[in-house]
């Protein structure tokens, strides 16, 4: 900012602009265009049963490929989309595309796989969300039992409102999973009142679970409370056999991570479905 702004009365930068880097401004601008130009596509990462390796779900992860800037990571552009509200139209597109794809695979004859879609706080509190979800289900023909939303603990900063909305979503027959569990706001005592089905253990506990007693203790605590409250648990970010072994011994039944599969393109995921050995229906 200009130091002597008081002297000539001319303000070059206000403090808000000062904080936002040029890169950030460029991202906002490009993001707005990207939605119109449909530069996004979805990858799908398998979720598996840890004892059998069978597929139990797939998480849809958005990807942005900019014609000049190349691939831009979700951790970079999702926060910008959230701040600017662009996550609302983008999120609707993600939901629709994911559901279309799930139905496409079901109609091609593959066993149904539950689809998980990440939902931002901003989307959750958008008044139009419920009608939007209903419209997507109706238009795509996806049965709600095959859909799950992943929300982070940050939604529970507004515990009461979040609970009401999640309850409405659940009333449609859609499951709710708490993403990155253990890192955010919620305490164990909240859990018994929250309308959720699954706890998704944050990768930070999985990373050193085989090395650090503290991480293993936290995971054990999550597993134990989940069992009492009758919640499903899935461990995220499993990369090694060592991590898998400890998780399995501690009684974690489901997982996701590079050890099993990286996020796959639609085409790769379809190949995965084709080669799959377990053909029982997952739910
Ligand atoms: P998340 O929902 O917790 O997704 C898991 C992230 O961990 C994904 O990163 C995934 O590629 C990555 N991952 C999976 N397995 C492993 C592993 O074994 N090791 C490591 N190191 N990483 C693994 P990604 O796709 O870059 O997404 C990052 C975050 O961006 C997501 O975290 C989610 O918060 C957000 N995001 C991604 N797609 C969407 C979307 O469609 N909508 C919304 N609202 N947010 C999304
Ligand atoms: Mg997620
Ligand atoms: Mg996560
Ligand atoms: Mg995350």
Image (cartoon, rainbow, N blue to C red):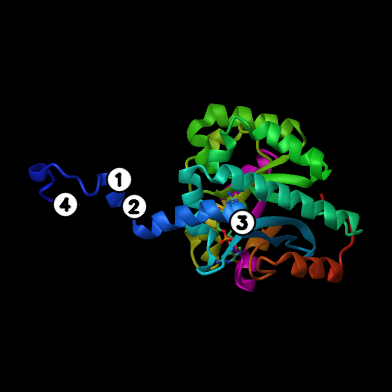
**In this view, the mark in front (3 or 4):** 3
* Residue placed under numbered mark 2 in the picture: 20
- The CA span between labels 1 and 3 is 29 Å
* Residue placed under numbered mark 1 in the picture: 16
Is label 1 in contact with label 2 (beta carbons under 8 Å)? yes
Q: Earlier in the sequence, mark 2 or mark 4?
A: 4
Check disc 1 and report its element: helix, strand or loop. helix
Q: In this view, does 190 lie to the left or right of 128?
A: left
**In this view, the mark in front (1 or 3):** 3
Q: Give coordinates of residue 254: x percent, y percent.
A: 70, 57
Q: How many marks?
A: 4
* Residue placed under numbered mark 3 in the picture: 37
Q: Outermost residue, right direction?
A: 109
Q: Is residue 218 left or right of residue 262?
A: left
Q: Mark 2 near ligand 1 (CB under 8 Å)?
A: no
Does residue 200 belong to the magenta stretch?
A: no
Q: Say which residue appears at 47% left-offset and 41% top-offset.
A: 185
* Residue placed under numbered mark 4 in the picture: 2
Crowd class of label 4 (few under 14; some 14 to 19; many from 20; radius 10 Å):
few
Is label 1 in contact with label 3 (beta carbons under 8 Å)? no
Check disc 3 and report its element: helix, strand or loop. helix
Span of residues in magenta: 221-246
């Amino acid at each position: 900012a200009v130091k002597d702004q008081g002297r000539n009365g001319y303000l070059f930068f206000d403090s808000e602009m000062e904080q936002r880097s040029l890169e950030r401004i460029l991202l906002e601008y490009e993001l707005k265009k990207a939605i119109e130009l449909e530069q996004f596509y979805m990858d799908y990462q398998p979720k598996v049963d840890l004892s059998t390796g069978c597929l139990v779900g797939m998480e849809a992860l958005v990807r942005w490929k900019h014609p000049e800037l190349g691939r831009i990571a979700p951790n970079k552009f999702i926060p910008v989309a959230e701040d600017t509200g662009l996550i609302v139209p983008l999120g609707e597109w993600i939901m629709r595309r994911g559901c279309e794809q799930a139905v496409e695979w079901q109609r091609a004859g593959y066993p149904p796989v539950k689809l998980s879609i990440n939902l931002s706080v901003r989307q959750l509190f958008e008044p139009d969300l419920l009608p939007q979800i209903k419209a997507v289900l109706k238009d795509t023909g996806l049965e709600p039992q095959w859909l799950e939303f992943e929300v982070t603990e940050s939604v529970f900063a507004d515990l009461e409102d979040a609970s009401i909305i999640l309850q409405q979503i659940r009333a449609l027959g859609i499951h709710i999973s708490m993403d990155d569990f253990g890192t955010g706001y919620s305490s164990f005592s909240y859990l018994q009142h929250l309308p959720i089905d699954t706890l998704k253990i944050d990768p930070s506990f999985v990373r050193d679970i085989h090395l650090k007693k503290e991480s293993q203790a936290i995971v054990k605590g999550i597993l134990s409370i989940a069992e009492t409250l009758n919640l499903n648990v899935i461990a995220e970010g499993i990369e090694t056999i060592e991590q898998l072994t400890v998780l399995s011994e501690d009684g974690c039944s489901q997982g996701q991570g590079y050890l099993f599969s990286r996020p796959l393109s639609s085409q790769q995921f379809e190949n995965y479905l084709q080669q799959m050995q377990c053909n029982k229906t997952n739910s």
